[in-house]
């Protein structure tokens, strides 16, 4: 039987506190909305926010997280480097990471990309976005139509300064003419990473059933396998196969084996 997937939804949680209009859309915060639909889908989703001690991401929390979801925008620089490193180590060990919308510029996503992934075109003009499925066989696209429409979103346009992705799952078209790689996957260490573009804070994007389906699918895809082989790295003095008897133990023999 498959274990219940443990998710931590991390949100900066500043826009919702500072702006009544955004709080009206997400009264429990973006993190509350996302954790809500993940729990309904049978996952065990908790939340963490920037202003909590250690940003709510104590080692114990991360150790008990299969997939971490990240939404941040105005305060990327306030995330302590020590916590970024802690999240990074857990991704290397197999924790999945899903970066949403403006998390493209977060410290953790930039570190995982190794490029200036904060760089892209953008415009806030309440324009229509069409998300096209590029890879219908991909687990993250399951249960979706071949495209879906968000009536109002912020525009993100290419060129998006990311490394070439493992999988390109979605491409967005915007009313103003730009296109964008809006769903991309990476493998980093043992961890699976997914970036998903929609989710500007002034729109109720995370209530859209297709957006929710993408995030639910992505959590299932990014969760580490329970039976992943344990790898032994570093100094391994004991060979796994017997070594040949023809091993030189003098410099003369060594030179002879090299034809000198
Ligand atoms: Zn935005």
Image (cartoon, rainbow, N blue to C red):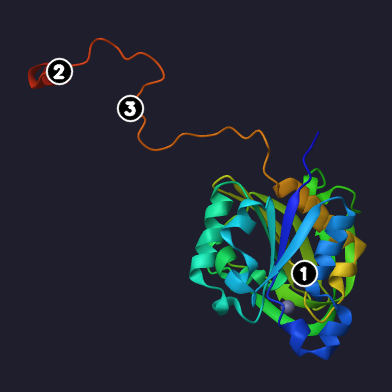
- In this rendering, which labeled residue sits more in front, label 3 or label 2? 3
Per the model, the C-alpha gap separating discs 3 and 2 is 17 Å
Which residue occupies 57% across, 58% down?
Answer: 59
What residue do we see at 32% from left, 15% from top?
243
Marks 2 and 1 sit apart, C-alpha to C-alpha, by 64 Å
Q: Which residue is mark 2?
A: 249
Question: Considering only order in the chain, which callout, 2 or 3, is on the residue closer to the N terminus?
Answer: 3
Q: Quadrant of residue 10?
A: bottom right
Q: Secondary structure at mark 2?
A: loop
Residue 143 lies, with reference to residue 76, above or below; the image says above
Of mark 2 and mark 1, the one earlier in the sequence is: 1
Q: Is residue 73 left or right of residue 132?
A: left
Q: Dot 3 corresponds to which residue? A: 237
- x, y percentage for residue 209? 91, 62
Above or below: residue 21 compared with residue 213: below
From the viewer's perspective, is residue 152 above or below residue 96? below
- Give residue 31's mark: 1
- Front residue of 148/22: it is 22
């Amino acid at each position: 039987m498959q274990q219940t997937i443990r998710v931590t939804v991390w949100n900066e949680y500043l826009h919702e506190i500072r702006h009544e209009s955004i709080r009206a859309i997400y009264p429990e915060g973006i993190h509350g909305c996302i954790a809500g639909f993940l729990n309904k889908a049978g996952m065990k989703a908790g939340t963490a926010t920037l202003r909590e001690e250690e940003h709510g991401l104590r080692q114990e929390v991360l150790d008990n997280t299969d997939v971490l979801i990240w939404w941040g925008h105005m305060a990327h620089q306030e995330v302590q480097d020590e916590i970024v490193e802690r999240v990074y180590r857990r991704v290397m060990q197999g924790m999945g990471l899903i970066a949403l919308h403006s998390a493209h510029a977060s410290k953790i996503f930039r570190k995982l990309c190794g490029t200036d992934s904060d760089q892209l075109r953008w415009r806030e003009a309440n324009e229509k976005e069409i998300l096209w499925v590029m890879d219908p066989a991909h687990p993250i696209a399951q249960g979706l139509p071949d495209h879906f429409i968000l009536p109002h979103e912020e525009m993100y346009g290419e060129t998006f300064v990311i490394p070439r992705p493992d999988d390109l799952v979605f491409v967005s078209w915007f009313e103003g003419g730009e296109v964008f790689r809006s769903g991309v996957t990476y493998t980093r260490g043992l961890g699976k990473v997914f970036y998903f573009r929609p989710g500007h804070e002034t729109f109720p994007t995370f209530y859209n059933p297709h957006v929710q389906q993408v995030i639910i699918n992505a959590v299932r895809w990014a969760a580490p396998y329970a039976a992943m082989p344990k790898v032994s790295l570093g100094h391994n003095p004991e060979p796994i196969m017997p070594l040949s008897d023809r091993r030189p133990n003098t410099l003369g023999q060594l030179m002879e084996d090299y034809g000198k």
